[in-house]
Amino acid sequence: MSQSKLPALILPIDPHSCAGGSPTRVRHLQLELAVDFTSHTLSGIATWQLVNPESATEIFFDVRDLTVEAVVTLDAAGAASETRYHLGPVHAVLGQALQVALPYGTAAVRITYRTSPTAAALQWLAPDQTAGTEPFLFTQSQAILARTWVPCQDSPGIRFTYEATVRVPAHLLALMSAENPQHLNSTGEYRFRMAQPIPSYLLALAVGDLAFAPLSHRTGVYAEPATLPGATAEFGDLEQMVKAAEQLYGPYRWERYDLLVLPPSFPFGGMENPRLTFVTPTILAGDRSLTSLVAHELAHSWSGNLVTNATWNDFWLNEGFTVYFERRIMEHLYGREYADMLQVLGNAALHHTITELGATSPDTHLRLDLAGRDPDEGLTEIAYEKGCAMLLTLESLIGRPRLDAFIKEYFTCFSFQAMDTATFLHYLRAELLDPEPGLEARLNLAAWVDGPGLPANAMVPSSALFGAVEQALARLAKGEAPATLLPRPADWSSHEWVHLLHGLPASLTVAQLGALDAVAGFTNSGNAEILMAWFSHTLRASYQPAEAAVEKFLRHVGRRKFLVPLYRALLATPNGLARARAIYAEARPNYHSVATGTLDALLGEPLAQH
């Protein structure tokens, strides 16, 4: 079924952007930025070329904590004219609407502005917060933080191409989600071009003491010099991942696929910025055991970057497909049994999230209603793992070949476009469900999309490799000593150790934890996923040998996935609030606003001033 046979794509109005009701849209950005590490600000000029401006008398942009210094309009010849503009009332989450009048003949709008030193998208790091001796800047625009460093139509349903000129200190390298330099130049001025249209949340910038190592003709790694050798070894399979993805769902459309390893304060595991995925150093385990995260971000080059959720209510369309795709890549590279372990761990995380949110909560639906809320509240395992589980269930009903053909055609048909849930369901029915009477009922589609929790027909993943782990857990439960049944740490993958830790009872004593630690060396592990699972037990039992490691982890790592549950576990311990606040007061400058926004609320309002 071609796109032309679908009804016209009438996307819903985005509740998180004032541009949803704007009578005209942007199509291309010319951006000039000067990066000031002393004042922690960007000085910018954003020139937006418009789509059909002759049909409108005004345009709306999203801004948050920006100082707008001037706004002019440009005609087709580039001649500038002053124009009226107005900033709307301030909303704590959404920021403000910038309303600009468009005189007849307008072709573009030029906005001169400065960012705030506390702009939520920007993380300014001092040298002692990095792996080297120089300061560092990186952005995190998803979900609606692009508006804190560029005045824009900050909705995932609006796409644009861009070019940029960025001026930085001459000894630092600038990178963007665009065509990138691979070496320093002598001037500190860098020019960028992104020829494929992207939504604003994929606009990204990083500046630091960075070096580059190629991995293949189209893949490579950027990192601070001290981090680069380990990162190069860790990501040695990157080109094979790209090839595997192409074999599954069609050609890679973004030319290069490079990684940037950020300092530890990065709040996510990864961010799928086109051409330049940002990744956390917490996946540098030394054995490539956590590189499924890279497969996930690579899969976003199709699911999310190529076909994008129209609003954050449709977030599952980005993430559910991406998790499914990620595990297919890992299966292609490392075998079905390896991918099965990832499915089991993901399923466990999904059940944990459903328990936390409440089995009847509307936040456990795939199609969300986040109007009036921060869209980051929808960033849960529901979108990721429930979305993947629906696709696994569909695969069980129709077989992989049919599902693969459907997904590949879906990416092709809607490339560089937005997709909302209603339109996707229409396409799914037309392509797969309606031609086979009764299939939609067997899939239980409505329960997946608009029902709470997990439908009764959800597939229950299993793992043959976890069989030995289950046996070890059963023998431990009978009182056998860890030294008699657990293998050497190198004999199991990190996934097997994490599964063991997840399966241990919550009632373990300090002595029992010590026996486990003596065999497996959990407290001194270099694997962040193992540490996270281990610390949940050590905090509960007040296991003293791990306390220094917990505090070091919380002070060093900024990944929100780890921080929130660890601080919650700390709060549940005796004197936990005082201890958590003491650690947080010291660690907070290392965290991005995406993390501190959650942790300030968790640990108490007074901490927001630190």
Image (cartoon, grey):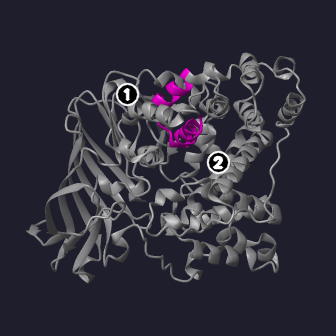
Q: Where does the image place residue 9, in percent across and percent down from the top left?
A: 50, 78
Between 519 and 434, the one lying in front of the other is 519
Q: Quadrant of residue 496?
A: top right
Between 554 and 147, the one lying in front of the other is 554
Residue 326 numbered mark, or none: 2
Q: Is residue 325 shown left or right of residue 401?
A: left
Q: Is residue 282 shown left or right of residue 333?
A: left
Identify whether 56 is placed above or below 597.
Answer: below
Image quarter in which the N terminus is found:
bottom right
Between 324 and 545, the one lying in front of the other is 545
The residue type indicated by label 1 comes to Gln
Q: Are marks 1 and 2 in contact (CB under 8 Å)?
A: no
Pointer 2 local density, CA inside 10 Å: few below 14, some 14–19, many at least 20: many
**Dominant SS type (magenta):** helix
> Which of disc 2 and disc 1 is earlier in sequence?
1
Residue drawn at x 57%, y 37% as measured from the top left: 566
Q: Is residue 106 shown left or right of residue 449?
A: left
| Mark 1 lies on residue | 129
Please give the range of residues in magenta: 548-573
> Element type at marker 2?
helix
The Cα atoms of the two marked residues, 1 and 2, are separated by: 31 Å
Q: Nearer the viewer, mark 1 or mark 2?
A: 1
Image quarter in which the C terminus is found:
top left
Q: Where does the image place residue 473, in percent across and percent down from the top left?
A: 84, 32
